[in-house]
Image: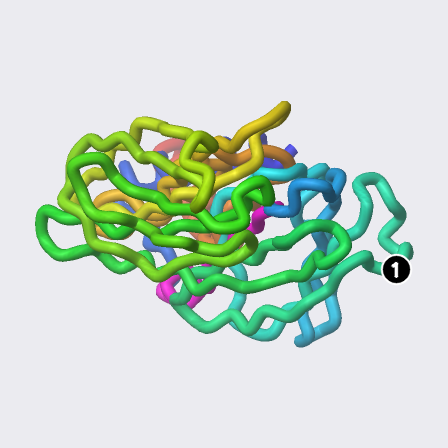
């Protein structure tokens, strides 16, 4: 239903622009610029799929944010109004009235980006909020950090072959600061400290001005694996919607301007129709 509505509004907007009529309200652009960007992640190897809810302290409104999120899943970024939120996790399919299995808070600031995620083994499960730096890296470079979510490697080294070490001895359920790396193609290697045979490699391409997160995970059957998330592409444009490594519950609401522009579009259309009727009446006379 949302897709149909968006397509209809897009068609109207294109028609109006062709006639030189449509101007998007400045308030709509300001709301997008001042929004916070938030995504969710599930980094607990032995915790089953969950539903994630967001409750805004302002207005006490609760919404189902992500549905059926499993280990290793990461949603795309979504725009939210700045403010204080409670992030709550419930078993997938549980009623919203079910007491949350885990809850923590997120203070979303205007223009900032965050990853809200559950980390650790189930017995020590806890929620954290990572501050994501989506600003462009210096010319010709990319910015990369590591989230260590592999319980089979209590500590891990992560290196980019031919480039810098991205992490040394990073502990399970923790993350690193960002590291600058020359833009280019790399083989990313993660290995357990004290057990170098426990390792995983993946290929990654880092474009200039881009931002990435390398996630180290337990593999499905045994061993470990790695994924590379594209946090921001050139000129620090944050991908919205599910990234290549993402999974469940990442459906995105239409952009703010779609709803903000509706009154203006209706007024423009009404004016255009009225003008056409007057012109037709004059021609008939």
| Extreme residue toward the top, this view | 221
- Residue at the limit of the structure toward the front, as seen here: 194
What secondary structure is found at the residue carrying circle 1?
loop
Q: Quadrant of the C terminus?
A: top left
Instruction: Estimate the x, y position of residue 125 in percent, counting from the top left.
Output: 70, 57
Between 248 and 279, the one nearer to me in the picture? 248
What residue do we see at 61% from left, 37% from top? 2
Asked if the stretch drawn in magenta spans residue 71, the answer is no
Please state the extent of the stretch shown in magenta in the rendering.
Answer: 26-42
Q: Mark 1 = which residue?
A: 99
Quick check: is 41 in the magenta stretch? yes
Q: Is residue 269 left or right of residue 69?
A: left
Q: Position of residue 185 (x, y in %)?
A: 20, 31
Is residue 18 at least partly visible in the picture? yes
Residue at left 84%, top 40%?
93
Q: Measured from the top left, where is residue 45 in percent x and y?
A: 66, 41
Judged left or right of residue 213, residue 114 is right
């Amino acid at each position: 239903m949302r897709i149909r509505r968006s397509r209809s509004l897009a068609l109207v907007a294109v028609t109006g622009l062709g006639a030189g009529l449509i101007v998007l309200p400045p308030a709509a652009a300001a709301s997008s610029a001042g929004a916070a960007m938030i995504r969710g992640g599930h980094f607990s190897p032995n915790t089953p799929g969950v539903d994630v809810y967001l409750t805004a302290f302002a207005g006490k409104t609760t919404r189902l944010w992500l549905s059926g999120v499993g280990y290793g899943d990461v949603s795309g970024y979504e725009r939210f109004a700045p403010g204080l939120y409670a992030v709550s996790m419930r078993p997938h399919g549980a009623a919203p009235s079910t007491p949350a299995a885990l809850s923590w808070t997120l203070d979303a600031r205007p223009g900032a980006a965050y990853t809200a995620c559950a980390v650790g083994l189930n017995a020590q499960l806890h929620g954290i909020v990572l501050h994501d730096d989506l600003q462009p890296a210096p010319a010709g470079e990319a910015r990369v950090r590591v989230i260590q979510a592999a319980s089979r490697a209590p500590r891990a080294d992560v290196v980019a072959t031919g480039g810098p070490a991205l992490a040394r001895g990073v502990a399970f359920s923790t993350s690193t600061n960002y590291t600058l790396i020359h833009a280019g193609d790399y083989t990313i290697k993660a290995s357990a400290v004290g057990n170098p045979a426990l390792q995983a490699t993946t290929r990654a391409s880092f474009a200039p001005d881009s931002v990435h997160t390398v996630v180290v995970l337990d593999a499905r059957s045994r061993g470990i694996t790695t994924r590379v998330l594209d946090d921001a592409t050139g000129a620090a444009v944050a991908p919205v919607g599910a990234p290549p490594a993402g999974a469940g519950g990442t459906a995105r609401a239409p952009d703010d301007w779609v709803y903000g522009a509706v009154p203006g579009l209706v007024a423009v259309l009404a004016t255009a129709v009225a003008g056409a009727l007057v012109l037709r009446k004059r021609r008939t006379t």
